[in-house]
Image (cartoon, grey):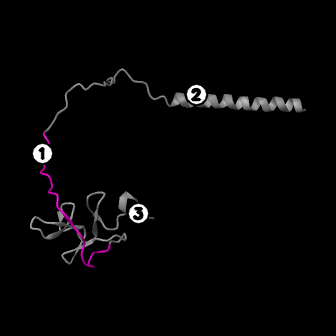
Amino acid sequence: MSGSRTLISRRIPGALVVGLLVAMLAALVSCSGRQASGDEKEASAVAQSSPKLQPVPAVPPAPVRERVPSQGDCAPRYANGGKGTCINNQPCRGFGVRAESGSPVCTCFGHDGGCQEGQRCDPMRLACIPEDEPPFGRSKAQ
């Protein structure tokens, strides 16, 4: 009996391997894609026309302004737990910089006056974004 059992146990793995090979071959043939018909144009790796270039409008560089620290305890608290700054004893949804006149002003990356109510200044996007949006591009908790 042990002789026939050994023979069967050797045939099953061999049959299994052959079956898997046939299944893989069938999958490979079915995934090979469609044949190109004679009606279609053949693709070329080289462009047939030159690119159409348009001049880029000149944008003046933004002035680099010296940062000023938050002073006082009027800084707004954001819904995500963050905190704005206090500039000229006023809540600032951004940070303080020194204006050309030398006085501190609230700004958020060129948006003087800082962000509106319900927004916060995001250092990753360099812009005002909704206050409850998670930092660093993370998704909101479910």
Residue tagged 3: 140
Q: Quadrant of residue 96?
A: bottom left
Q: Position of residue 14 (x, y in %)?
A: 72, 29
Q: Nearer the viewer, mark 3 or mark 1?
A: 1
Taken as a whole, is the magenta stretch helix, strand or loop?
loop
Q: Position of residue 38 (x, y in %)?
A: 36, 20
Please check the rendered image and state whether residue 62 is part of the magenta-colored stretch, yes or no. Answer: yes
Which of these two is toward me, 133 or 113?
113
The amino acid at mark 1 is Pro
The amino acid at mark 3 is Lys
Range of the magenta residues? 55-77
Spatial separation of the CA atoms under disc 3 and disc 2: 45 Å
Q: Position of residue 36 (x, y in %)?
A: 40, 24
Residue tagged 1: 57
Spatial separation of the CA atoms under disc 2 and disc 1: 56 Å
Farthest residue toward the top? Answer: 38
Farthest residue toward the right? Answer: 1
Q: Give left or right: position of 6 versus 137.
A: right
Q: Position of residue 48 (x, y in %)?
A: 23, 24
Residue at image point 23% right, 69% down: 116
Residue tagged 2: 25
